[in-house]
Image (tube, rainbow, N blue to C red):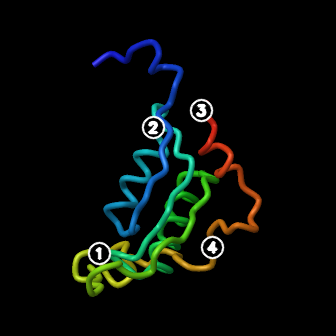
Amino acid sequence: MALHPYELHMAQKMIIDTDTASDDAVALVLALTDARVDVLAVTVVSGNVPLSMGVQNALYTLEQCGSTVPVLAGADRPLVREHVFAHDVHGADGMGDIGLPLTGRTPWTASSSSRAPTRARSPW
């Protein structure tokens, strides 16, 4: 399907909210490598894996894509139900337990230097 000329110049701005395990890592790679998508930030909540693990998985994925998009940590538990992780599906580390270096990266914080908040408000 051919893109409309307007679509060739304007990438769709997105803030991606994820509970980064292997399935979401694939979605991040697709979004970050698609010229039609401008990822402004990635927010991570607890879900498939604990919050700290999901944040590290997102940071690792962005690093592999050469992206400097800010990653922000969100909710560390569900709001209205008991938490159930999906380690039986995604492995103990959420990325298939294949030995990836999934520690030591730092998410964006309010004191971090980043363009995400201003870019998110900008119409262009």
Q: Circle 1 — which element?
A: helix
Q: In this view, does 25 lie to the left or right of 58?
A: left
Residue 50 numbered tag: none
Neighbourhood count class around disc 3 (C-alpha, 10 Å): few under 14, some 14–19, many 20 upward? few
- Identified at 47% across, 34% down, the residue is 12
Q: Circle 3 — which element?
A: loop
Name above or below for residue 50 compared with residue 1. Answer: below
Type of amino acid at the residue the image marks with label 1 = His
Q: Is residue 52 left or right of residue 107?
A: left
- Taking depth in this image into account, of 79 and 88 the one nearest to the observer is 79
Query: Which tag, 4 or 1, sits closer to the chain's start?
Result: 1
Residue 90 numbered tag: 1
- Which residue lies under the disc numbered 4? 105
- Identified at 74% across, 65% down, the residue is 112
Query: Which tag, 2 or 3, sits closer to the chain's start?
Result: 2
Residue 123 numbered tag: 3
Measure how far apart labels 1 and 2 are at the Cα level: 25 Å
Type of amino acid at the residue the image marks with label 4 = Arg
Q: Circle 4 — which element?
A: loop
Measure how far apart labels 1 and 3 are at the Cα level: 37 Å
Name above or below for residue 91 compared with residue 69. Answer: below
Q: In this view, does 103 lie to the left or right of 81?
A: right
- Taking depth in this image into account, of 67 and 41 the one nearest to the observer is 41
- Identified at 30% across, 85% down, the residue is 83
Type of amino acid at the residue the image marks with label 2 = Asp
Measure how far apart labels 2 and 4 are at the Cα level: 24 Å
Query: Which tag, 2 or 4, sits closer to the chain's start?
Result: 2
- Identified at 64% across, 51% down, the residue is 116
Is any atom of residue 97 visible in this view?
no
Query: Which tag, 1 or 2, sits closer to the chain's start?
Result: 2
